[in-house]
Structure formats: structure tokens, C-alpha cells
Amino acid sequence: MAIRTVATTPFPGQRPGTSGLRKKVTAFQQPHFLENFVQSVFDMLGDATGKTLVLGGDGRFHNRSAIQVVLKMAAARGFARVLLGQGGILSTPAASCVIRKHGAMGGIILSASHNPGGPDGDFGIKYNAANGGPAPEALTEAIYERTLALAEYRISDAPDIDIDTRGEHTVDGMRVEVIDPVADYAELMAQLFDFGAIRRLFAGGFSMCFDAMHAVCGPYAHAILEGMLGAPAGTVINGVPLEDFGGLHPDPNPVNAEQLIELMAAPGAPDFGAASDGDADRNMIVGRNFPVTPSDSLAVLAANATVAPGYAGGLAGIARSMPTSRAADRVAEALGVPCYETPTGWKYFGTLLDAGKATLCGEESYGTGSRHIREKDGLWAVLYWLNLLAVRGGSVQDIVTAHWQRFGRHYYSRHDYEAISPDAARLLMQDLRIKLAYMAGQKMNHYEVQSADDFEYTDPVDSSHASQQGIRIMMTDGSRIVYRLSGTGTEGATLRVYLERYEADPAQHHLPTQQALAGLIAIADSVASIVLHTGRTNPTVIT
Ligand code: VG1
Ligand code: CO
């Protein structure tokens, strides 16, 4: 067997976005496309001699053939060992867990997360560092620069290996250990949560529906919920990972997880519902006829953190992405701990977690996580809720409404305008930036603008800087409108408009969300001239 050096030419668009490089499967199927990116990642890493790489993916179409390519390139790069999830499967949180537990140099995760899959869908790849977290911006930019200059890559001509049989294999002298994708992760969960209490909850007749959306969480949810915790068989639905997610859009929100939402609203609904996304790092929590917003979920977990044994010592701090509602800030204030506001994307939480400054983190996009790994973690959040329900009793709705009574309610919604023209999206943002300087003090309906800016962030740990992270319009009553462009889409541009209104009065906590936000929604449209720029009169998705 030999290592071949293959001549190649750069692909112009290989800049990682909010979470890795995502493109259509057809883009990844072009000769050299995947290889170029993997070589560019490898070129940015130090000496791999004696080092371990973790490898796995969310099982979507193209995963299995991409795994073979990465293995052969890792052998050519000189890695001593690869830990590969059986069948090429590792959820994003499990990959983070395995990297940390086994002291790997890093990991490659093949996933386009919440993006649709299948031959006409999306594929993706991201590199996670030794702390188990997504490569920081400086590294992803260096990788991108490298893709633009790449002239060759190195790959072994060893044959494909059997990725479905656990145990040791060899690729050109490099050891490949095919591991159980669930075991390390399940062991970690059992350390963090009171599995005894949750087992008793299920034994007492508590019912749940977990929708794995035919994505990678299925095996994890089956093993942990139905296996270790004794939930009845059938608790997990859509639990078999499929290459095209069975045609579902594996994004756990009330629009895409329609089956779960309907079930939770029907007579005789289970006590508790949850769903996770393509790579199992997102979660949606649903009570009986009562979806919980991710921002509220973060705040509720933070306020009740000590119910779980892994967090019995309390929180050092909370971190949330800028567009996430400020419900968590109120909890942090009450607990007397700091609340950090970061740009969108889990990579910005890494330094805070490594430095012990934050214990819990969250994003409005159905992402919650903690210091236990360096990625958001869907099933972890679900287990946290189960632990809370087991200890506190009552329903999801009871817990959330009691939380609102104590802290006030942050009405929250995100309006997405998908697949709009990139030029129109850029113009809209440019126009908004020009308007920023004149906005403070302006009266809009019954709101008054307190301040407006383009969010910038300086990392309190390593002082790295990120600018143009979203335009914020902040009202004197604490309400906010935020605009930013998505960094994960693969078709045109996606405009996200985030709306938040604070309501202290419990008598006003029962309003339908869109109604409560109607005034802000009208302002958001007129300030940014959304209809004019995009030609759209309505958002594509409202969550
Ligand atoms: C979106 C979300 C962001 C999340 C990212 C990755 O990014 O808004 O909060 O971290 O997806 O999630 P964007 O740039 O499209 O708004 V996942 O589960 O797709 O890796
Ligand atoms: Co995801």
C-alpha cells in the first residue's frame, strides 16, 4: 500500500459557516471536493504522530463513502489511531464526549445538522479540537485560506474497511477502532443525572414521546430512555436513522416536528415530549399542548440547576447567544452569577467553558448544553428536564408558568425568510447599518428606541474579536428586534428576524406569542423594508 499525492485545484466556496462547511450533496460528490477540505484541515494541525482522531457522522446520505475517504487521508497524514463510531455514526455531542474522554487530538464530524439530507439534500463536515469543541473562528478562517491555495492532497490507496464491525482494523498501518457510538456518551449522562429518580418516574406511569426524526439520536434515545431508564418500548418514535431522514426536515421546532406537536396536543397526550435534530445536538421540549421556547428552557434549567447531581454545586455562570432571549439573564442575576452574551454558534462558548466561567449555555435555535462537553447536546437537555420533573413533580406547563410568575415572561419568536436573493439580503443589512446611527430616540408605534448597534464581541478569555454579528434594535421597555443572516443555509440567503418582548405582569402571560409580538413584528418589517427588499410578504418559517 502506498500514499499517493494527488494534484488538485482550489474550490472557491469552502469557507466554514456558523458550524462547519455545508453544501449540497452534489457539491461534495465532485471529485476532490471533500479531499481538498480535509487536506486543508489537516494542514492546519500540528504533528499527528502518535495522535488519535475521532471520526463519525450523522448517518446522512454520503456519510459512509466520506468516512472511507477521511480514514485514508488520516492514514496519509500520519495519525496513529482513529476512533470511529460503528457504521460511521457519532452524534455531535457523542463525538465531543469521545474526543475529551480519550484524549484525542481532535475529531471530524460529518454532518449538516438540521439541514435536510438525501441525494438532493445537504452534506457537511466540521473539525472539533482537543477540548471537544468546534474549531474557533481563527482556525476555520485559516482552513479556508488554505483551501484557496491548495495544490495537492495525500491519500492512502489502502482498500475500504468494514466500518460496521466493532473492533480493530488497519488502514495503511494506522489503527482504526470501531467503537460503540453510544457507550461513552451514555456513561457520561449517568454521571450527570439522577437515573434512579428518572427510572422511578417512568415506573410510576409517566409517559413520554421522543421524536428522533429518523436522525442520529435514535440509537442514543433507544439505549438511554428505553434501555437504561425503563421507558416503555415505543417511547422513541422515528428512531431508526435513515440516510434521507425519511424525507423529514430534521430540525426540531414546532413547524418541522409536526407529528410530535400534534400528538402532544391530542387527547390523551403523553406527559412529556421532546425531539432532536440531524446530529442530535438540538432539542425541543414540549409539555401537554405546551411547546417550550428554547430560551425559556435554558432559563428554567438554570433556575433549577441543582436538581441534577452533576450540577449540585451550582452554576459558575450562564452564557447565551446574542439573539437568545434574556430570560436566562434574569436567572443569572437572581443567582448572583455572570451571564455572557456571545455571537451565534457554539464555537463562541468554548473559551468560557474551558475557563470555568460558564456552566450552562444556550441558543434560541433549540440548543442547550453545559460544561460536560463542548457542543450543545439534545438528549442531555431532555434528561435534565426528566430529572427536574422527577424531583419537582407537576407538569411542564406548571414549571414554566411558575418560572414566568417569578421572573416575568419573555415573549419570543424567530421569523425566517429562507432562500432569498443573497444580493437583496446584503442590501437589506447594509441599509439597516446606515440607519443605525439615527435610530436612538425614535418613536415607533408605542415603542421608543433606546439604542441600536451591530453586535460586536470580544472574548473575555482570549480577547479574540468578532464583528457584524447581528443588528440589534433595543427599546426602552426592554423589547428587542435582532436581524442577522444565516451561516448554515445552502440555498441563497436566509434572513433571521428575532423578536423579544418582556412582560412582568402574570395577568398578561397567557397571550398567543405572535399576538403579543404583533407591534414589534410590524416595526421589524417597516424598519428593514423586508417586503421591499425580499419581495416576501411573510416569513417562510415562524418558530
Ligand atoms: C443556526 C442557528 C445557530 C446554531 C447553528 C448550528 O445558525 O441559528 O444558533 O448554532 O445553526 O446549529 P445560522 O447561522 O443558520 O443562524 V446545528 O444544530 O445546525 O449545527
Ligand atoms: Co445540530
Image: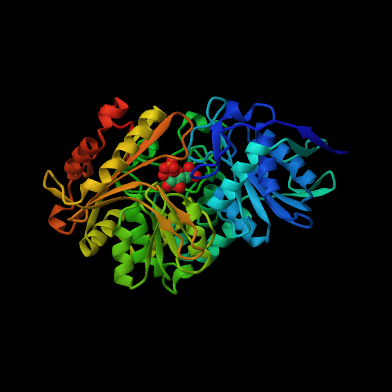
Q: Nearer the viewer, residue 84 or 193?
A: 84
Q: Residue furthest right?
A: 1
Q: List x then y, in percent, for residue 98.
A: 63, 56
Residue 371, compared with residue 168, is above or below; it is below
In the image, residue 374 above or below residue 528: below
Whether residue 483 is visible here, answered yes or no, is yes
Left or right of residue 278: residue 504: left
Indicate whether 351 appears above or below 74. below
Q: Nearer the viewer, residue 457 or 105?
A: 457
Q: In this view, does 167 lie to the left or right of 195?
A: right
Q: Is residue 57 visible?
A: no
Tell me the quadrant of the picture where the C terminus can be found. Answer: top left
Total tally of numbered discs in the picture: 0
Q: Who is closer to the viewer here, 333 or 11?
A: 11
x, y (%) of residue 15?
A: 55, 39
Q: Estimate the x, y position of residue 211 in percent, counting from the top left.
A: 45, 42
Color style of the picture: rainbow
- Determine the residue positioned at 23% across, 56% down: 409
Front residue of 204/131: it is 131
Quarter of the image where the N terminus is located: top right
Please state if 173 lies on the left or on the right of 301 as rendered.
right
- In the image, residue 460 above or below residue 376: below
Residue 339, given in percent of the width and then of the height, sits at 37, 64
Q: Would residue 477 be found to the left or right of residue 43 on screen?
A: left
